Image: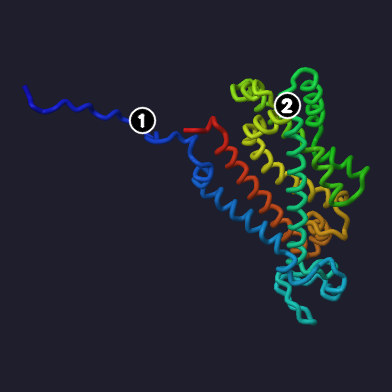
Amino acid sequence: MSDTPNVIPPVPTPSGMAAATPSRWRPVWEEFAESRTALIALGVCLLLLLAAIVGPWLAPQNPYDLTEISFFDSRLPPFSVSPDGPFYLLGTDNQGRDMFSAMLYGLRTSLFVGVASGVLAIAVGVSLGLIAAYAGGFVDALIMRIVDFMLGFPTILVALMMLAILGQGVEKVILALVVVQWAYFARAVRATALSERSKEYIEAARSLGLSHARIVFGHLAPNCMPPVIVIGTMQVASAISAEATLSFLGLGLPITEPSLGLLISNGFNVMLAGLYWISVFPGLLLLTLIFAINIVGDRLREVLNPRNAR
């Protein structure tokens, strides 16, 4: 008989499977950072956000202050120096405004409209979605029929009709975007809340005699946030695009307000004359902003979706 002790061989782990904690328990940031493209997009978003915040101090001039612009400097190409001395990195538009300064101010407005409308739409949509799922019955049917009605029309069409009635202005554009966005959040939150309301922690909260408002917003709402974060990111990009479209069509912001959509519209009629920079540079900035936000949102969808856990 051999004196060698019996050794239990190690159980082989399947290829590609982590031996420690499952992937779904890893921090969200670690999962997010695995995508270099998403990291670059997040960096672009943060850089543009910082540029919008410090825009008034970073811009060489206030392009919407008539005392700081000169009509004699209008339509100057990029890298031009005016006879009065100012240097225009990205040229000037039809009114003599510095394009670099105008784009910083327009970026500031576009981000404000997108974030403000997104936050308000989340507040309305999440509240109604939670109430529909928790109450059920007639309340649920009524809210979801309204959601179906809102989602049955194109977003831009509803916004156009509202602004045709309300008129132009930042607050009116935000209101129109909230009206067309809240239904997306309500539908997503209701679907998640329906699977959560029958779980043990909700039953325990009811048995403790907690109020319905505390159960809905204190216990049920936090477990419905992952889809809200993903949809919210996408809707911010959609709101920025919609605001630019409305302003381009002349129904969004007035001409006295900075907007990337208005800057694109100002140069659209003179592009064939060779003045490409008036529309192209704001258009590239808008495209970069929306593209970066969508990449970040798509990566968050992959990270926060439990079906993608390895």
Indicate the secondary structure of the residue bearing disc 1.
loop
What residue lies at 56% left-to-right and 53% top-to-bottom?
40
Q: Which residue is mark 2?
A: 212
In this view of the protein, can residue 283 be seen by the observer?
Answer: yes
Q: Is residue 118 above or below residue 17?
A: below
Task: Locate residue 224, reporting x and y percent.
Answer: 64, 32
Q: Nearer the viewer, residue 17 or 278?
A: 17
Residue type pointed to by label 1: Pro
Image-based side of 286 in relation to 47, left or right: right
Task: Locate residue 48, reporting x and y percent.
Answer: 66, 58
In this view of the protein, can residue 184 be seen by the observer?
Answer: no
Indicate the secondary structure of the residue bearing disc 2.
helix
* Label 1 Cα neighbours within 10 Å, binned few <14 / some 14-19 / many ≥20: few
When asked about the image quadrant of residue 186, the answer is: top right
Task: Locate residue 265, reporting x and y percent.
Answer: 82, 56
Residue type pointed to by label 2: His
Q: Is residue 87 above or below residue 293?
A: below
| Label ID, residue 293 | none
Colour mapping used in the image = rainbow
Task: Locate residue 20, reporting x and y percent.
Answer: 39, 36
Q: Which residue is mark 1?
A: 14
Q: Nearer the viewer, residue 55 or 84?
A: 55
What residue lies at 71% left-to-right and 60% top-to-bottom?
53
Mark pair 2, 1: CA separation: 47 Å
What residue lies at 61% left-to-right and 46% top-to-bottom?
295
Q: Is residue 249 above or below residue 146?
A: below
